Image (cartoon, rainbow, N blue to C red):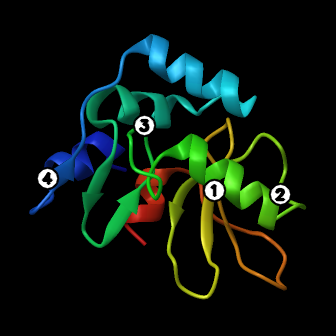
Amino acid sequence: MMRLLEIIENSEKVFTYASMSYEKIQQAEKELKVSFSEEYKEYLAEYGVAIFNGHELTGLCDGKRLDVVRITCKEREISEFVPSDWYVVENLDIDGIVIWQNQSGEVFQTSPMRDSTKIANSIAEYVLL
């Protein structure tokens, strides 16, 4: 299985923001009261945000739509039954579908009026679906 960074590096037409310091990553975790998975921390440290292969992954940036802190806070208000240790890795903006990750790296999908569903064991696995 390829790592997320390898998938991004090998993609065409990749748009990224900026690498993030460990301190900025820790600050985001503190604000959300979560621990990011190692995979997500590695991604944030390298890219900050990445758009590739039809995916727009959240990260740390000034944009409202892709900043993990802003979008997770917003989605927690809408999806009140989502566990508090989950954070948004992608908001598809289609039928209310949101992709979340937990500290151990598992990836889940939520949508209105449906139970959450585990869809992958990592973001890398998810983006290859």
- First of labels 2, 3 by sequence position: 3
Name the element at disc 2: loop
For the residues labelled 4 and 3, the Cα–Cα distance comes to: 22 Å
* Mark 3 neighbour density, 10 Å: few (under 14) some (14–19) many (20 or more): many
Q: Quarter of the image holding residue 31?
A: top right
Which residue sits furthest right? 81
Q: From this view, report whether residue 74 is shown above or below residue 6.
A: below
Which amino acid is tagged 1? Answer: Trp
Which residue sits furthest left? 12
At x 44%, y 53%, the residue is 66
Which amino acid is tagged 4? Answer: Asn
For the residues labelled 4 and 1, the Cα–Cα distance comes to: 24 Å
Percent across and percent down for residue 7 are 25, 52
Which amino acid is tagged 3? Answer: Leu
Q: Which residue occupies the foreground of this view, 91 or 106?
A: 91
Are the two marked residues, 1 and 2, in contact with CB atoms closer than 8 angstroms?
Answer: yes
Q: Which residue is mark 1?
A: 100
At x 70%, y 34%, the residue is 32
Q: Which residue is mark 2?
A: 82
Are the two marked residues, 1 and 3, in contact with CB atoms closer than 8 angstroms?
Answer: no
**Tag of residue 60:** 3
